[in-house]
Image (cartoon, grey):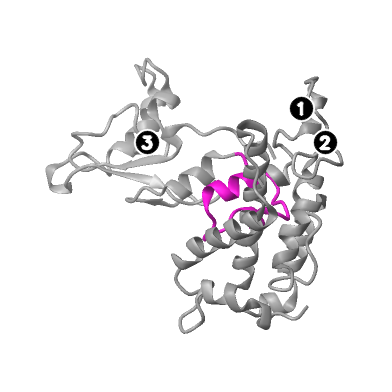
Amino acid sequence: MLQLKPKLNDLMRCNVGDGKTASFWYDWWTDLGLLISVFGARGPGIYKSRYILLSPRLQPMPPSDSRGKDVFLWRNGDWADWSFSKKFSSKATWNLLRQRSPVVPWCNLVWFKEAVPRFSFVSWMTVLARLPTRDRLISWGMTVPAACTLCSSGLESHAHLFFNCTFSSAVWSHFAGWMFSTPPVSPDSVITIIDRPYIASCPGAATVIKLLAQVIVYCLWCERNHRIFRQVSSTEAAIISRVGRLMGDCLLSLPPPREGSASYLLLFLSSRSLFPP
């Protein structure tokens, strides 16, 4: 359904008090809406029909000091809900202004409360296959080597670089058995892991898996860029160590998923014994 872009005045209303700050023509203070939109720039003028339309709206709400100050209200519902509040909500306003699209199955894999923005961004671009991998650079007409930067074999694509490359598989395999029995082969397979019953029944397990997947993808992308732009390479063991450090730093700062439950960090460290292969 086509949604028209709202104007600022569609999001605000004014409860008239003393009338010192409200605009007669340009604020929405009657059920007619903005009077400038109803009557035009010339106002009601001498047209009797227009005066009859406006007069009943003026009588119940004359400005008065006894009514207090004018109060401006912000719309806080959707377009079908005409509710207004004294408090401004950036979330409600954004939901009114943005163009909505269908929910994608990977949204919770990329965007979640405990996520780190830089990890989420790289994961988002990976899911959309929008990172400048060598296969994409070649498709744009650039002359670059086609081989994967990490393993020097196979065409460097998103699927190969992050999941099918021997270097990447070694990193994933180190953590296999902690959260999953075999390394995932795509973002969709990570979603499948999260949806398993024993993961859903363990508080915080899905969050740890999602964060681990994002950290691995982020570290692999950084390693790829370091090799190209800095001519510096790290071993698989070094990347595994970096993933572990980043996971520790991230999880240590998070409160337990539920009151009385194990912390995210303890869950990550003990997950080999918690989750079946």
Q: Pointer 3: what residue?
A: 28
Can residue 132 be seen at all in this image of the molecule? yes
Rendered location of residue 197, percent (x, y): 73, 78
Residue type of the residue flagged with mark 2: Ala
Residue 210 found in image quarter? bottom right
Q: Residue at x 52, y 53 (%)?
A: 116
Query: Element at badge 2?
Result: loop
Q: Left or right: 20 with respect to 93?
A: left
Q: Secondary structure at mark 3?
A: loop
Q: Name the front one of labels 1 and 3.
A: 1
Which dot marks residue 147?
Answer: 2
Viewport quadrant of the C terminus: bottom right
Residue at image point 76% right, 52% down: 167
Q: Was residue 104 drawn as part of the magenta stretch in this picture?
A: yes
Q: Position of residue 63 (x, y in %)?
A: 20, 39
Task: Indicate the quadrant containing the N terminus: top left, top right, bottom left or bottom right.
Answer: top right
Range drawn in magenta: 99-122
Measured Cα–Cα span from mark 1 to mark 2 = 12 Å
Q: Residue at x 34, y 46 (%)?
A: 73
Give the foreground label among 3 and 2: 2
Residue 245's disc is none
Of the residues shown, which amino acid type is indicated by label 1? Leu
Residue 159: percent from left, percent from top = 80, 47
Which sits earlier in the primary sequence, circle 1 or circle 3? 3
**Closest to the observer, 264 or 200:** 264
Residue 78 seen in this snapshot: no
Write the residue at 72% across / 51% down: 104
What's the distance in space between the residues labelled 3 and 2, CA to CA?
Answer: 62 Å
Res 137 label: 1
Contact? badges 1 and 3 (CB < 8 Å): no
- Above or below, 217 against 197 in this view is above
